[in-house]
Image (tube, rainbow, N blue to C red):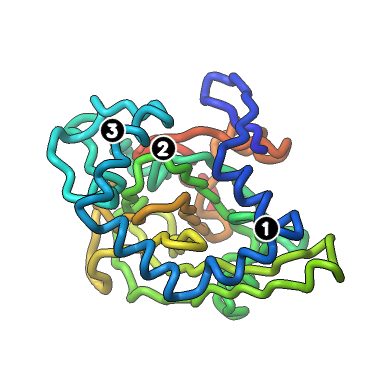
Amino acid sequence: MHLTADRKGKIEKEHSLQDRLLEGLYNHKAGRMLVKPLCMPAVSACAARFLDAGISTLFVPLFIRCHSIPMEEYELTAYRSFNDFFTRKLAEGARRVEPAHDVLISPCDGRLSVYKIDDACVFSVKHTRYTVNSLLKNKKLAERFAGGYVWVFRLCVDDYHRYVYVDDGAVSRHYHIKGLLHTVNPAANDALPVYKENMREYCLLKSEHFGTILQMEVGAMFVGRIENGPAERTVRRGEEKGRFAFGGSTVIVMTQKGQALPDGDILRYSKSGVETRVKLGEQVGIRAKHR
């Protein structure tokens, strides 16, 4: 279950079908016994092929109804597969990218939590607890962001699943971190039934207004795919970076010390364990005045 707030201050409880399924898999003995075979490469490959196949479009109308997706926000087109629908494009004008250079924008639609990077900084991504060091698997890189912020954008299956660069600048190559799954004997340990790390990919953006920014995508455990565009080039704020194929996913942004400050409502909610709903291109922070 998640507590989420909109920018007007309304707080609601969210307990999606996806959350309930994951809790069943990870927190109960029968579910834990299914995790490993479900995550086998052959099973994931079959699921991916089906979602890319034309017959999978039969599930699109039901998915739209079940998740109350506002299709008027998206381009009017015929879909070739379920994944073609899932990665659909917004209609022109459906999102506004904040143009002010001193504003940090959201890279995607999602639920945002912000964490100060210090020795006590621990945060959850897809039911796994991380420190900055364990997330990046690179201590030297993690040290570059000490004193800054981690911005965790959690996407649900009904969100727009394309994401953009948060500022102008020069982008590095993509760095890939493989996923990890370890199932513990169900009878031996109920407190930690499954240890997992999802596949993730990141780049470094040498931005014009916020120092060096790290942008990371975290894929879904089963069939989610990260599909990033070309790297090692100059990019513009609001330019599309990539997209996720089917599966709830997460985008993570890291900013360095003295570069960006989260908006007050987002920081206040995050300290209380409440996520804030945000849209692609919307302001989520500002440039720090003293850098």
Mark 1 and mark 2: Cα distance apart in space: 25 Å
Residue occupying the point 27% across, 28% down: 71
Residue at the limit of the structure toward the right, as seen here: 188
**Going 28% across and 52% down the picture, which residue do you hit?**
83
Which residue bears the numbered disc 2? 158
Residue 179: % across, % down: 53, 73
Determine which of the numbered discs, if any, sits on residue 67 in the image. none
Horizontally, residue 247 falls left or right of residue 168, namely right
Q: Earlier in the sequence, mark 3 or mark 2?
A: 3
Residue 146 percent coordinates (x, y): 63, 65
- How busy is the neighbourhood of tag 3: few (under 14 within 10 Å), some, or many (20 plus)? few
Please name the residue shown 31% across and 46% down the image. 86
Residue 113 placement (x, y as % from top left): 59, 44
Name the residue at 67% across, 50% down. 24
Q: Amino acid at mark 3?
A: Arg
Q: Which residue is mark 3?
A: 96
Q: Earlier in the sequence, mark 3 or mark 1?
A: 1
Q: Position of residue 164 (x, y in %)?
A: 32, 51
Which residue is situated farthest in the left direction here?
77
Q: Nearer the viewer, mark 3 or mark 2?
A: 2
For marks 3 and 2, give the CA distance: 19 Å
1 or 2: mark nearer the eye: 1
Using the image as rendered, state which of residue 75 and residue 260 is in the foreground. 75
- Asked if one can make out residue 237 in the rendered structure from this viewpoint, the answer is no
Considering depth in this image, is 32 or 217 the residue closer to the camera? Answer: 32
User: Is 124 left or right of 219, judged from the image as shown?
Assistant: right
Q: How far is the residue under mark 3 from the one under mark 1?
A: 42 Å
The answer to which quarter of the image holds residue 43 is: bottom left
Secondary element type, mark 2: loop
How many badges with numbers are in the image? 3
Going by the numbered disc 1, the residue's amino acid type is: Gly
Q: Kindly identify which numbered label has been placed on residue 31.
A: 1
